[in-house]
Amino acid sequence: MLKKLSVIPMALLATVAIAPTAMAGTTSTPINEPVVLRGTSGGSQESDCGFISNQPNEMLRVTEGLTSLVFTLESQGQPTLLITGPHGFNQCVMANELSGGVIEVPGVWEEGNYSLFIGDRAGQENRYTLTIAQE
């Protein structure tokens, strides 16, 4: 019986380790120190913002109106950042050959929930680092 119990956690761990990164974490404002998030970009869903996952990579909850935030995405390949939010908000930013795989999106954000999709124009999967800072 003990042997069976020790196998189950290892099987669960193996499943989690090979599953795609479709499990979004949620970050909420206010943000006192920059939040650094890591994961894998890309996905099988083709969009106007490259190939993305069918689920957001990250979630952001802005808890007060008109919050000044900066998103900085660093990745290899041809990264994209799609941000969707309240009232039909939809913004896509793509890295170009001059940006060196870095996307920076400053802005003032309304209160509400935002979904962040980290994609790739070529359909590749790459490791990314996303930093969210409040100004």
Image (cartoon, rainbow, N blue to C red):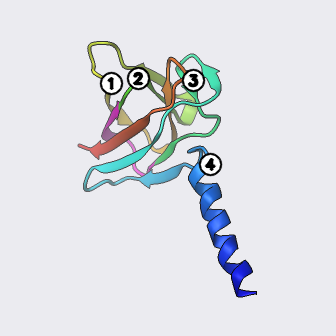
Q: Amino acid at mark 1?
A: Gly
Sequence-wise, the earlier of marks 4 and 3 is 4
Q: Is residue 50 above or below residue 25?
A: above
Q: Residue furthest front?
A: 3
In this view, the residue in front, 65 or 107, is: 107
In this view, the residue in front, 83 or 41, is: 41
Q: Which residue is mark 4?
A: 19
Pointer 2: residues within 10 angstroms few (<14), some, or many (20+)?
A: many
Q: CA distance from mark 2 to mark 1?
A: 7 Å
On residue 77, the disc is 2
Pointer 3: residues within 10 angstroms few (<14), some, or many (20+)?
A: many
Q: Residue at x 34, y 54 (%)?
A: 30
Sequence-wise, the earlier of marks 2 and 1 is 2
Q: Which residue is mark 1?
A: 101
Give, as a single range, the part of the protein colored magenta: 61-74
Q: Report helix, strand or loop for mark 2.
A: loop
- Whether the residues at callouts 2 and 1 have beta carbons within 8 Å, the answer is yes
Q: Report helix, strand or loop for mark 4.
A: loop
Is 20 left, or right, of 64 in this rendering? Answer: right
